[in-house]
Structures are given as structure tokens and as C-alpha cells.
Image: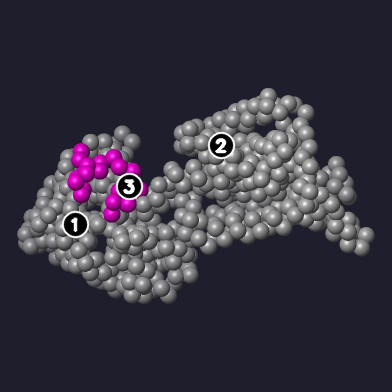
Amino acid sequence: MTVALQVENLNAFYGKSHILQGVSLEVREGEIVALLGRNGAGKSTTLRSICGALTPARGAIRYKGNDIAGWPAYRAAQAGLLLVPENRGIFNLLTVEENLRISERKGSPWVLGDIYRMFPRLEERKRNGGGQLSGGEQQMLSIARALLNNPRLLMLDEPVEGLAPVIVDEIVNQVIEIRNKGIPILLVEQNLAVCGKLADRNYIIELGRVAYSADAATFAKDDGARDRFLGVKAE
Amino acid sequence: MTYLFQILNGIGLGMLYFLLAVGLSVIFGLLQFVNFAHGAFYLLGAYFTYDLVERGVSFWVAMPVAAVLVTLIAAATEIVLLRRIYKLPHTFHILVTVGLALMIQELAIIAWGPLGGNVPAPEAFNGVIIIGNFVYPEYRLFVIVFTAILAGALWWVLEGTRVGAVVRAGSESAENTALLGYNTLRINSAVFGLGAGLAGLAGALAAPIRGVEPFMGLEALGIAFIVVVIGGMGSYTGALLAGILVGVTQSVMASLWPEGARLMIYLGMALVIVTMPRGLLGRA
């Protein structure tokens, strides 16, 4: 399969803290890749460095024939690298529809009507302010904005964190739909059950480096890896 | 009836204050940038109009040209100088922009002299309107109507268009706006330029009413800050409401107790700071 995104030896700092100490990973066309790891391991920092919200100190990010390491966030977004951040990044002072409208980009496979079919709640709440939405609705809105923005690769940072189980199922189904439409996804997720449903391959990050990688079937059977890197017992 | 006259006068004055202050307010909302050079852009707008009219250019050409020139100068200043200091504490903003304001003021004195001058009202509006025993200068009426239309158009741009939504998004979070593919640096320069251009337009419109003199920028800066503080930092409707409140207060007080006009305005501002620190329509 063709490689959509290749990250090599990525190093990044927050102030003087050396958070990423050489992360290497790749995302291929048509797959969902999950980044796992304990809190503070560098999962979110990896996503933020790829999309330019944080400027990496060293390393290469190969995407569509360019090394985009150090590109400003707006250029990465224009090139189709869309981050759905952990805080969801909703504009509270804009209505739901305004949040969507400013995200529309020509050429995207999704238009506003598609979004309202995928997430009927967003249409019901389109006149509400972004700040009035529930956590699940905010997550839907954040994903919807990325879809309107003509994504070529989607990065989701803990998309189901803190959401009710019924909403988790809805989001999981939509993420699979997005992948099936041909958009590769790089996912940060702590919830192993969700990872099991979504991921085609997994990377585990520890202390700012990739410590383990495996495809979904291997990872599912590897209780040892889960114990060692994530400190959780297999269910 | 005299009060009606004063109130109308105050509304005209207030609309100019709104134009003057709205840019300062939006710039603060977007960039958290304290701009003490804002009054200097008002000064430039007035002097450019004066200069062009002196050269025989029609006021109707001079006014928009002055506003566009101020917009370009302000945007260039933002790109060359001001964007480098946004991240520094507010004290640095004040130091740099006060310095900039003083430079512009001194350059105006070098270019046009220390004495100032008058700009005649454009011919179409240099008469008075008489209704019963009520006399009102036509030009002031024009200013009220023109700024009201402009205020409506601005409101529509900010609240009703995609560009306005992006500006409001940027004032909430620059990072999240960039993550959607917007070059926030460019948006900042444009908003800064246009905000300053509105102050320049206020100066151009005010020139036929109050003339031009080198210290009008300082006075305008004080008024603009009062309006922004009363209305709420970053609030468009707040600037409109506060502009009119300040204008009407000033105008009505001028006939009741002229020496107290400023006192009332500063007292009002103090009252707002104490009771509603975010201003009348400021947001959290």
C-alpha cells in the first residue's frame, strides 16, 4: 500500500522539555493507525508537530512528496492535513453553522448537506452557539469541520474521551465510514476497546519514542505488550 | 427642543466616536494588542483630507483616499513593526505605540505646521436645515446618516459573512483558526489596517466639523479608550452603544454644565470599571 504520511526521527520540545525524542511512524492509504501510550508519552505532541501547531526541532515529515516539518499550521491544513484536537477547538462565539461554514473548502468530498446527514444533531443545533453544545456534539462538529476542509489525512486526538457509550458508538461508526471513503486516519486513543474496533495498525509511544508497533490482529493477541506499555490488564 | 438638538448633535459625535473606537476594540479582541497609536491614525486621516482639499481635490474624493492611505500605512506598520511585539507584555505595546504616535504627530507638524487649519464642509452639505425654530447643520446630518449606513454595513460584514466569522474565530483562538487553513498573520494585518483605516475615516469626517491640529490624535485616543472600556474590549455593538452614550453625554452636558462634560464621561467610565469590569457588552 502507498504511504500517505511518513514521520522520521521527529524531535519536539515544549520549552526545555524534550517531549518527542525521535518518533518514526507511517500511515498508509486507506488505513486507520492508532497511537497508544501512557499520559505524557508524547501522543498529542506527535499530532501537533505533524500538523504544524508545534514546530518540531528535528526530523522529517514526508507528505505528498514534500518534507513539511516546520510548515505553519495553515499550510499543512491547506494541504489536507487536518487535526481534530483534543480540546475539539470549537469556536464558542460562532454558531454551529458558522463553525462549519468557515471550514468549507472547495473540492472536499463532503459538503454541508452530507455533514447534516451524517450528524443530524448538528443540523438541529445549527443556530446554537458552539459553546452550548454537549461534549459529543462538539466532537461531531470538530470532525465535521475537518471533513468540510477537504482532508487528505485526518488526525483525531482522543475523539471519544469522556463521551457517553451511545455517542462513542456513533462516532466510531462515522470514523470507519470516513476511512472507507478513502481518507487515512491517524488516531490517538486511550480506550483499548475503541482502538480494537478502529485501528488497522497500532504504535505504542513511550517516553517520546515508538516502543512497539503491530497490526491489529497481532496486537489483539499480545497481552504482554499491553501489560508492559500500557499497564492495563487484557479484558 | 434644545435638548433634542443636543441629543442629535451627540448622536453625530457619538457615531464618529464609534468609527474611531471600533477598530481599536476589534484589534484588541483579535490580537490582545494595546494600540496607543490609534489616535495618530485618526490624525493622519484628518490631515490627509485637509491636504488634499487644500490642493483642490473634492472632499468626496479626499475622504475615501485618506481612509485608504491610512489603511495601507497602518497595515505596513503592522507587518514591519507591530507583529513582532504581540507576544511581549502589554507594557511593551504601550511603549512602542506611544513612540509611534509621537513620531506621527511630529511628522504631521513638520509636514503641515503646528497651527492646524480648517476644512470647509463639502458644498452639497454646507447649509443648514430648518424645521420650525430648529436649525441644524446639514453636514452633521450627513455624518450621522453616512456613519449609520457604514455601521450597518460593518455589522453585516462581521456578523453575516464568512470573512467576519473568520475574524471572530481568530479573536477566540488564533491556533484553532490556523488549524482550519487560515493564515492568521495575514488576517491580523488586514484587520489592523482596516481598523486603523476606520479611525482615519473618522478623522476625515471630523475635519470639516472641528478642523485639523496636531494634537487632535491625543484627544481622539483618550475618547477611543473611554468608548472601548465602557463598551467592552472586543465588542462591536459595545463600541456603538458606548460611542453614542459618550457623544450624547458630552453634547448634553455642554449646554447644562460645560466644565463638567469631561468629568461626567470619566466618572461614567470609572463607574463601569468598578461595576462591570468587562464593559457594558464585553464578553468573558
Q: Chain of mark 1?
A: A
Foreground mark, 3 or 2? 2
Q: Quadrant of residue B1?
A: bottom right
The answer to which of marks 3 and 1 sits earlier in the sequence is 1
Question: How many C-alpha atoms fall within 10 Å of the one at disc 3: few (<14), some, or many (≥20)?
Answer: some
Q: CA distance from mark 3 to mark 2?
A: 27 Å
Which image quarter holds the N terminus of chain A?
bottom left
User: Which residue is at 92% across, 63% downward?
Assistant: B132
For residue B73, the mark is: 2
Q: Which residues are magenta?
A: A59-80
Element on which disc 1 rests: strand
Q: Amino acid at mark 2?
A: Ile
Q: CA distance from mark 1 to mark 2?
A: 50 Å
In the image, residue A160 above or below residue A16 = below
Question: How many C-alpha atoms fall within 10 Å of the one at disc 1: few (<14), some, or many (≥20)?
Answer: many
Q: Is residue A227 left or right of residue B166?
A: left
For residue A75, the mark is: 3
User: Are the two marked residues, 1 and 2, in contact with CB atoms closer than 8 angstroms?
Assistant: no
Q: Is residue B188 visible?
A: yes
Q: Is residue B89 visible?
A: no
Q: Amino acid at mark 1?
A: Ala
Magenta stretch: includes residue A63: yes
